[in-house]
């Protein structure tokens, strides 16, 4: 067993864990970041692609926005399609200039991985670990254990642990039963998503309501399209040939004078739809962030933004905690949950307005169409959609970095101030 010491142990190198490690490093705080998957897997995993203004500012302010600024596609609205018509919702006009930026989660992850490895060296993210465990959460020296890719078991004594290990991770289940309240809703449909090597057939995202089910035309870049179809949750991807997918997409997006461009399918998968919130987002010295604490259906494009927002709140809270001020850490959960619940409601609202519930009667469709007509004809209703889509609850506006490392903060690899003597890389 190798025993080491750090200030913050971070479980999971998704967007939340990677950004947290970076924000902490800018504050002079050491962390150990572990990830069960390989670097290649993390960088290729197709997920979200829409960043709120606040997320763009956060990444830019954290010094990891260069490629985002060069390659991100700023969008000033979305299209809602229903009843054979396509309507534009103009975010800039409705919200006084706010926008969203299309920049794939894969690219956010690549930028953050590259930055951490450049700043801290080759082992600054421990990829491909296994048997991750967190323990002693009620003490002020919580413990992180894992086995590295070479088979060596590690035990890291921390001041705090951040559970950024997604919905299926080990951190949330490590919290004793009864300490968490959980709210959960599974939807009776899923999304079949494809990544296609073809320029998008649209300048902004199209959300299509159709009697056969919802469809979304999104994009990843000027040359790569991302498209989704509502399917049954027990649908098997093998039964969906590329031809069948394109035919169904063309049917749901059909509009006179407009053509859906088709191209090679690079990736396809089926994602279940779920709303899930667990609270509080802290137990002792374990702090949950991102999908580890909450999941939204992707219709509102909120999951990635919530993950980034959580760690923007968590980084200064951990810094204060490590300097003896526990108040921001005490209010971490409540500050995040206000944003989480707003996004949870908005994502549920968009989802239930646009999807066909299997077995639902004709009334559901009429109610949805009435709601959609209201959104595109009432400025108040359109503004409500626009301000939620672009991000209603602002991100913390405090400094993203305290600049130079606080006095007494350790250099890379050294023990934190006030920590017990390091038993550096001692084998047991
Ligand atoms: C298939 C899919 C499609 C999605 N599409 C969209 C979308 O279109 N729009 C949208 O807004 N959101 C979407 N989301 C949601 C969005 O991608 C997530 O909200 C976002 O990834 C959350 O980031 P995170 O860092 O909290 O979690 P994750 O990205 O899940 O990262 C968690 C990391 O922890 C690692 N991990 C797990 N267990 C352990 C362990 N025991 N030890 C160490 N590491 C561990 C995982 O491998 C992963 O790298 C999608 C999610 C999924 C699953």
Image: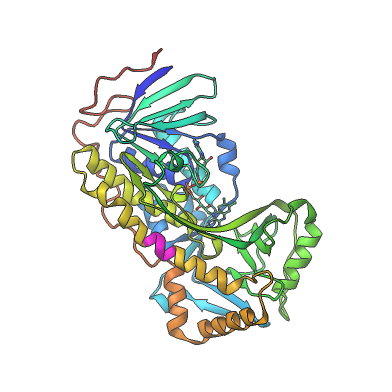
Where is residue 312 drawn, in percent x and y? 34, 50
Quadrant of the frame with the C terminus: top left
Where is residue 261 drawn, in percent x and y? 73, 66
Where is residue 226 drawn, in percent x and y? 64, 59
Where is residue 26 drawn, in percent x and y? 31, 40
Q: What residue sits 28% from the left and 40% below the top?
A: 27
Q: Is residue 272 visible?
A: yes
> What span is in magenta?
339-343
Quadrant of the frame with the N terminus: top left
Check if residue 294 falls in the magenta segment. no
Check if residue 342 falls in the magenta segment. yes
Q: What residue sits 51% from the left and 29% below the top?
A: 131
Q: Is residue 323 left or right of residue 172?
A: left
Is most of the magenta stretch helix, strand or loop? helix
Q: Is residue 125 visible?
A: no
Residue closer to the observer: 421 or 198? 421
């Amino acid at each position: 067993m190798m025993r080491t010491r750090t200030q913050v142990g971070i479980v999971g190198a998704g967007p939340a864990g990677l950004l947290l490690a970076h924000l902490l490093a800018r504050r002079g705080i050491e962390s150990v970041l572990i990830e069960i998957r390989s670097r290649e897997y993390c960088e290729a995993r197709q997920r979200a692609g829409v960043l709120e203004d606040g997320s763009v500012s956060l990444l830019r302010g954290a010094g990891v926005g260069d490629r985002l600024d060069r390659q991100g596609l700023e969008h000033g609205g979305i299209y809602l399609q229903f009843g054979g018509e396509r309507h534009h919702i103009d975010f800039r006009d409705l919200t006084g200039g706010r926008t969203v930026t299309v920049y794939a989660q894969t690219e956010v992850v690549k930028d953050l991985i590259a930055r951490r490895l450049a700043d801290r060296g080759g082992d600054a993210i421990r990829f491909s670990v296994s048997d991750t465990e967190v323990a002693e959460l009620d003490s002020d020296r919580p413990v992180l254990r894992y086995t590295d890719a070479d088979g060596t078991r590690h035990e890291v004594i921390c001041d705090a642990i951040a559970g950024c290990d997604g919905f299926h991770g080990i951190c949330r289940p490590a919290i004793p039963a009864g300490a968490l309240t959980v709210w959960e809703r599974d939807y009776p449909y899923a999304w079949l998503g494809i990544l296609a090597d073809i320029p998008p057939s649209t300048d902004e995202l199209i959300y299509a309501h159709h009697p056969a089910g919802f469809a979304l035309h999104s994009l990843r870049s000027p040359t790569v399209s991302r498209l989704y179809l509502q399917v049954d949750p027990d649908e098997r991807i093998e039964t969906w040939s590329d031809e069948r997918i394109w035919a169904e997409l063309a049917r749901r997006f059909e509009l006179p004078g407009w053509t859906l461009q088709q191209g090679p399918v690079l990736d396809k998968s089926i994602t279940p739809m779920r709303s899930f919130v667990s609270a509080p987002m802290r137990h002792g010295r374990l702090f949950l962030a991102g999908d580890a604490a909450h999941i939204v259906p992707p219709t509102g494009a909120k999951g990635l933004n919530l993950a980034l927002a959580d760690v923007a709140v968590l980084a200064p809270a951990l810094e204060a905690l490590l300097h003896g001020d526990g108040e921001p850490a005490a209010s971490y959960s409540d500050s995040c949950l206000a944003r989480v619940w707003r996004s949870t409601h908005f994502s549920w609202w968009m989802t239930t307005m646009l999807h066909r519930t299997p077995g639902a009667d004709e009334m559901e469709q009429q109610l949805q169409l009435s709601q959609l007509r209201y959104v595109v004809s009432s400025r108040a209703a359109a503004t409500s959609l626009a301000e939620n889509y672009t991000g209603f609850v602002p991100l913390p506006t405090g400094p993203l970095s305290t600049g130079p490392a606080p006095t007494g903060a350790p250099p890379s690899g050294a023990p934190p101030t006030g920590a017990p003597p390091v038993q550096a890389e001692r084998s047991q």
